[in-house]
Image (cartoon, coloured by chain):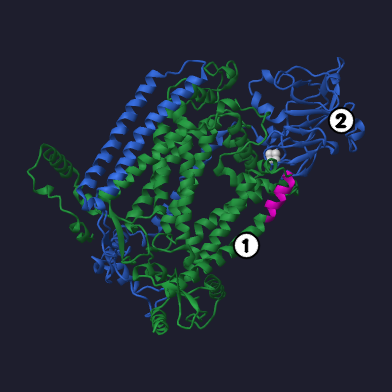
Chain colours: A blue, B green
Amino acid sequence: MADQGTGSGTDVEKYDAAVPTGTGIVTSDRIENPGFEPVRLRVSELDPKKDKANERRVALMFGLSMIGSAGAIAAYIIFPIVPGDPGSVRTNTFLLGLGLALGLFGIGFGAVHWAKSLMDGHDLVEFRHGTRGSDATRAKAAEVFHLGNKESGIGRRHLIRNTLIGALVFFPLPGIVVFRDLAPAADPNQLLKFTMWKKGTRLTKDPSGVPIKASDVTLGSVFHVIPDGLNDLPDKLEQKAKAAVLLMRLKPEDLHVSKGRESWNYQGIIAYSKICTHVGCPVALYEQQTHHLLCPCHQSTFDITHEAEVIFGPANRPLPQLPITIDSEGYLVAQSDFHEPVGPSFWERKH
Amino acid sequence: MTVDTTAAAAAPATGESDLPPTTGTRVTNWAANYIDERTSISGLVKELGRKIFPDHWSFMLGEVALYSFVVILLSGTFLTFFFQPSMAVVTYNGSYAPLKGIQMSTALSSTLNISFDVRGGLLLRQVHHWAALLFIAAIGLHMLRIYFTGAFRKPREINWIIGFVLFILALAEGFTGYSLPDDLLSGNGLRIINGMVEGIPVVGTWIDYLLFGGEFPGTAIIGRFYSLHILLLPAILVAALGAHMVLLIVNKHTQFAGPGRTEGNVVGSPIMPVFAAKAGGFFFIIFGVIMLTASFVTINPVWLYGPYDPSPISAGTQPDWYIGFADGALRLVPPHWEFMLGPYTVSMNIIIPILVLLVLLALVAAYPFFEAWVTGDKREHHIADRPRNAPTRTAIGAAGVTFYGVLWAAASSDLIATHFMLTVESVIHVLQALLIVGPFISYHVAKRICIALQKKDREVALHGFESGRIVRLPGGEYVEVHEQLSDYERWKLVSFDDNAPIMLRPNKDGKITAGARLRARASNWFFEDRIAPVSLTEIEQQHHEHAAVES
Ligand code: FES
């Protein structure tokens, strides 16, 4: 067997002699391929008793597989799901899966063991042929194209060819245009620039919607806030994705307030958009000691004492601040909407 | 097809064909005849039935991917019978008590019903998820195997590209599928996608608006992802997979060097029966492993996360592992990478990571063509390289793996920080530095290791290995006897190709172009420090010296 495999003369080798080797060095000083090692017989080929034992083993595994599959059916029936009892779900899942796994493993290990211990395991050799077609075949293929060209005249009749190309370029365009109605007619830029906060909208607790009194907000506390009336909206999630706010109270002397924002806090109570200016996760982690807000998605960190400016992480902009005050009953209300779009940056944000 | 059946003939003959036909064989014969007269399938069986597949553990990685895909199809089909891809809001009223009365999308409520009201539903959900994770992992490892053994070289470059497409499709399938239950965790994943798409210059806002069918989260995305997840992506995936297998058959499998194995043959087991039994059995084993894992280990417990809501989130949330490299890329961006271009906002903190990922993927796809250009080699290669015998390729691969690994680790920066009691800042800074220098370090270390291993191979091929037997020479000194290798053993160490850099030569107009210069330089870099395989002369010389010492 050995020499047949190593002898040269397959297509691959013949063809390869004619193609550039690039940087490959073909040296005459190569060590020769020693050819195949002599074949060694397996124990089971020499010993009929071992052969029989292996046969029994394979059959045993196939038998176990049947038991496993039958067990799976039994588990399905005997261990139903009891409504309201998560334990029963676990039992059902576990036993059903165990039976199925046994059914699968039995077949799998049986077949592999059969192949390894009982089937003829000696290596066989197949010659490779060059991947390219033979010269004759390639000539025939070229001829096909030649005839196609000649008989249709596509290479000659330029008018037909060019108009066809034009038609093929145009025909998918309607297919692109019809995707416009994937979303409603409105302009997303306008939608992204406004939230439902208005002058006088009460700040309420998320998710209950209970309004918050300034006196409820003690020093060091933090509230997750939604605008009053949000829970009754049909597009509640879309509005919440823009309007969610964090409310905190700091000592007024800890706040570094910039010009024009002096009236935006109410006695040290401040409200900032909860939507990260990076890619929009809720900035939900507040470190009381440092007055830092941390976004759990990519660890952008905002310093509340400095109007939520970014001190770490991939975000660029501070969280927008919601100007607040109190109404006649002492409840916290918005003075207006945010003064800039909330959430992730987008191309037309400042446009 | 030429098949050497000498070995088969050497096996004990069973003589079954001499027996008179039993009922069983008569039925099979009849059926075979019936089908062949209507399909001429006998030609196919003759062509493929005894095709040879070489054996090596690393060749099974692709099989694992294929088989887990079959498991994905089976379990996924079952899930479609119960899952409702709708974002219409319902009040949950199923068996999972803690969420009773909570408002959620129909998608999540049907996912909960699959988990808590359908027998075997949770099991198959977990089978589906585990199989998907295994699928992507196996594809990744399979690609690494192909890369590091040079199995992407001619004539397999196209199949590398198809395989690459399969990898991308698998990632897309993974992400769309992960999003379908519409739970808090997957919703936050979608939120990140939403923010990233919005960050794309010029068209981002509109693409995002169209994708989500209005403002985020809208009521369309789950249904749309469902169409992609169960229809469009799998259809392309199956077609690409078919092409992948057809080319595998056309090109035949690569094999590692070994005695008797050449570029012109393929040595191994025939499909019928050995490979079929092994591969078929292996499918059931993979299926079994997934099934067992799914019945023991909970994955994606959406009932603990609850419905999506843009406001809450829990610390330490992680995407599925295969998305990690993308998430990590976002995390490694330093603050304030955003600027204004007139009235427009340019979010480099999003554009750069997206570009980095695209370039990384493009380099992976293009590598076979790059190497072909550097080596100028137009021959077919069917003998897989040992990684050490292509040190520069291996080093580039190590650099790539390091780059990917750092991105991937960055996705867990917060967990790393809490686990090792560091600050997130310091972890990110270390990873930022590693992302830049890590690949260079890996490149050089891998290259040195390869060359050291090659030197060791030479040493062993020439002088044999240390036998552990010490003898005393007549002069009184002690030496350890070296055992020579057999020709077969030596062949594995010396059978690789030698290469020299491309020489800079003027083209036919007598000019040296800039392209040629670049290529020569690249080729020089690719083959510098190379170690030539042991030659025949060296072996003979060594034998003489050896004989001289002995006498
Ligand atoms: S979304 Fe907040 S850091 Fe990325």
Q: Could one spot residue B376 in this view of the protein? A: no
Residue at (20% x, 44% y) in the render = B39
Is B189 placed left or right of B368 in the picture? right
Find the magenta span and give its range. Answer: B423-433
Is B426 placed left or right of B95 in the picture? right
- The chain ID associated with circle 2 is A
Residue A201 placement: quadrant: top right
| Residue that extends furthest to the left in the rendered view of this protein | B20
Amino acid type of disc 2? Leu
- Residue A250: numbered disc: 2
Q: Are marks 2 and 1 on the same chain?
A: no
Residue A132 placement: quadrant: bottom left
Q: How many marks?
A: 2
Q: To which residue does mark 1 refer?
A: B440
Amino acid type of disc 1? Phe
Quadrant housing the N terminus of chain B: bottom left
Query: Which element carries disc 2, helix, strand or loop?
Result: loop
**Dot 2, how many residues are within 10 Å of its Cα: few (below 14), some (14-19), or many (20+)?**
many
Residue B353 x %, y %: 64, 49
Quadrant housing the C terminus of chain B: bottom left
Above or below residue B496? Residue A288 is above
Residue B14 x %, y %: 15, 50
